[in-house]
Each structure stands twice: as structure tokens, then as C-alpha cells.
Amino acid sequence: MLADLKSALASPRQSLQQVLNFALVLSTAFMLWKSLSVISNSPSPIVVVLSGSMEPAFQRGDLLFLWNRDAGTEVGEIVVYNVKGKDIPIVHRVVRKHVTVPVRDESGSTTPSSPKLLTKGDNNVADDTELYAKGQSYLDQEDLIGSVRGYIPAVGYVTIMLSEHPWMKTAMLGIMGVMVILQRE
């Protein structure tokens, strides 16, 4: 193994090519992610279910595909939202939609107001008002990351394992780095 490492480092041209190939793979993945974000109109078009609050609809580790281009959200729809001040996406079902009266300003024109949404996990006893930001009773449309349009079961469990066990992330990055160095063409 050390002989392979020595020969890989002996040729700077080959080493540079391997580094550039690795950079190409990373930039391609980034471009695909950004393209999905633009297409779905969602800052995070793919999320992983982190808890069992949506069982039996979704299990922990399921990979969800989101869409955020619909005009509105309906009761019964499964949405992903972020709570203000927290960076953890929550996957729950809309159980109530509160439509407010359009607001009339000083000039007499009416401004349509965004409907307010109340969500709840299928496996939870109570609704999500305790999860919302302080002073917030409903979600606004701006709080939504997207609506679930598809899923792949259990594929996202790798992400959960990597976040729960940081040493696995380090080991995986180390193995990938060694593989890049030892790769021959």
C-alpha cells in the first residue's frame, strides 16, 4: 500500500489529474443539487426523515423529494417546514388551513393574505404549535420548504448514521481520500 502511495505521489501530473477529477465530481454534485433546487423552487429539494413522527406514512431514514411550485397547500398534504431560528426540517401533515380576509390598505386596494397552516405528525398526539417559534400559532407559506411528491424508503439512513456517529464521517472521508490517491487510470 505504501508503494502504491509513493508511486502515486511520484507523478505530479497524475496526482493533479486525480485532484481535478475529484473536484469535478464534487462540482457536478453541487450543480445537480442547485438545479434540483431551481426546478423544485425549494432550498432543499431532498430531505431525510429524522424521526418516527410520520409513521406509518414515512419511516425514519426515508428520502423525500419535495416540490414547492404549487399555488397553495391543502389540508391532508404532507409538507416540510423550518421553524424560525432552527435549522432542522420537520415533515408533518397539514391538518388545518386558516384563510384570512384580504387586507385593505390606505389607497383602497386589497392585498391577499397568505393562508395560515397548522400541522401535525401522523404518529403524534398533539398538533405542532409547541414546535413553532415563540408567539407563532400557524405556519405561513414562506415557512414551507416544500410538499412531499415522492420518496425512497430507508435510503437516507446513511445520512442519519453519519450525523449520529461523527467518527463514521471522518472514516468515510479518509477512505475516499485514500481511494482518490491510489486510483490508477
Image (cartoon, rainbow, N blue to C red):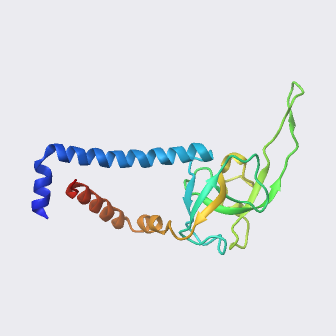
Residue 175, placed above or below residue 23? below
Q: Residue at x 76, y 46 (%)?
A: 71
Q: Is residue 134 left or right of residue 36?
A: right
**What is the tally of numbered marks visible in this picture?**
0
Q: Is residue 40 left or right of residue 120?
A: left
Residue 127, placed above or below residue 71? below
Please identify the quadrant where the N terminus is shown.
bottom left
Quarter-of-image position of residue 96:
bottom right
Q: Nearer the viewer, residue 154 or 112?
A: 154
Q: Let me know if residue 133 appears in the view.
A: no
x then y, percent, for residue 174: 27, 60
Q: Residue at x 42, y 46 (%)?
A: 28
Residue, far top: 107
x then y, percent, for residue 135: 71, 52
Residue, far front: 185
Q: Residue at x 79, y 48 (%)?
A: 115
Q: Let me know if residue 143 appears in the view.
A: yes
Q: Nearer the viewer, residue 31 or 56?
A: 31
Quarter-of-image position of residue 94:
bottom right
Residue, far right: 108
x then y, percent, for residue 44: 56, 51
x then y, percent, for residue 79: 68, 58
Residue 148, placed above or below residue 106? below
